[in-house]
Amino acid sequence: MKTKDLVVVALFTAVIAVLGILPAVPVPAIGVPFTVQSLGIILAGCLLGRKLGALSVLLFIILAACGLPVLAGGRGGIALFFGPTGGYLLAFPVVAYLIGWLTENAYPVWKVFLINSLIGALLCNLIGGTFMAFNIGMPITAALKSVLIFIPGDLVKCLIAAMIAVKLREVPSIRRYIQQDIQYNSH
C-alpha cells in the first residue's frame, strides 16, 4: 500500500469521526440512536472504493473498540459491540466494501443512490436489526420492524452521499486517483 493510500484512509477515518461530533438522536424504544456517521461510512465506499473504503471504516471501528470517543455522542469502547448497536458497528466495514465494489463504475447519481440505498440503508439495518434481536433478546421480526424507523433518514444520507460522490468524481485529480485505485485492486 502506498503512503498516499494510508494518508487517504486515515483522513477518511477522521472524517467519519468528525461526523460523530453531531449529536446522536436517541430512539428510546430500541436503544440505537440515529446518527450522521453512517453518511461517512457510505461516502467511504463511494469515494475510496472497496479496499480503501473498508480499511478506513475498519480503522474507525478499531479506534471505537479501543475506547476512543469517536462514535456519535462521544461514545467508544468494546462494550458497545455487545449491545443494541453492535450489529451496525460490525456491518459498517462490510457496507463500505460492498458500496465501494458496486459503485466503481456507477457514475450517474441515481445508480449510486440505488446501490447506497440497498447496501447502506437496507442491508445495514437488516444486519443491525438482526444482531440487536439476539443481543437484547427481542424477536427478530419485532427488531426488524423497529429499525424501519431509520430507513427514511438513511435514504436521505444515501442520496447526499451519491450526490457528493458523483460531484467529487468529476474533479480530475480525484477521478485519476479513483481510476488508479480500481486498476490497482483489479490486479
Image (tube, helix red, strand yellow):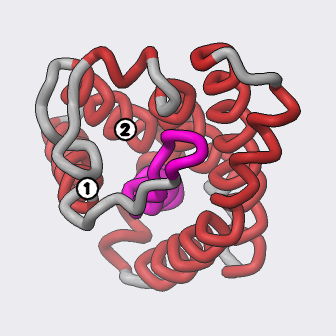
Alpha carbon separation for disc pair 2 and 1: 13 Å
Under circle 1, the secondary element is: loop
Please tell me which of labels 2 and 1 falls first in the chain: 1
Residue segment shown in magenta: 28-46
Task: Residue 91: tell me if it is visible.
Answer: yes
Locate residue 42, reporting x and y percent.
51, 56
Q: Amino acid at mark 2?
A: Val
Read off the residue under disc 1. 20
The residue drawn where x is 32% and y is 29% is 61
Residue 161 higher or lower than 37, as above or below: below
> With 135 as the anchor, is 92 left or right in this view?
left
Locate residue 118, reporting x and y percent.
77, 54
> With 148 as the anchor, is 6 left or right in this view?
left
The residue drawn where x is 82% and y is 26% is 140
Read off the residue under disc 2. 57
The residue sitting at the front extreme is 29
Image quadrant containing the N terminus: top left
Locate residue 14, reporting x and y percent.
17, 51
Q: Is residue 40 magenta?
A: yes
Image quadrant containing the C terminus: top right
Q: Nearer the viewer, residue 72 or 54?
A: 72
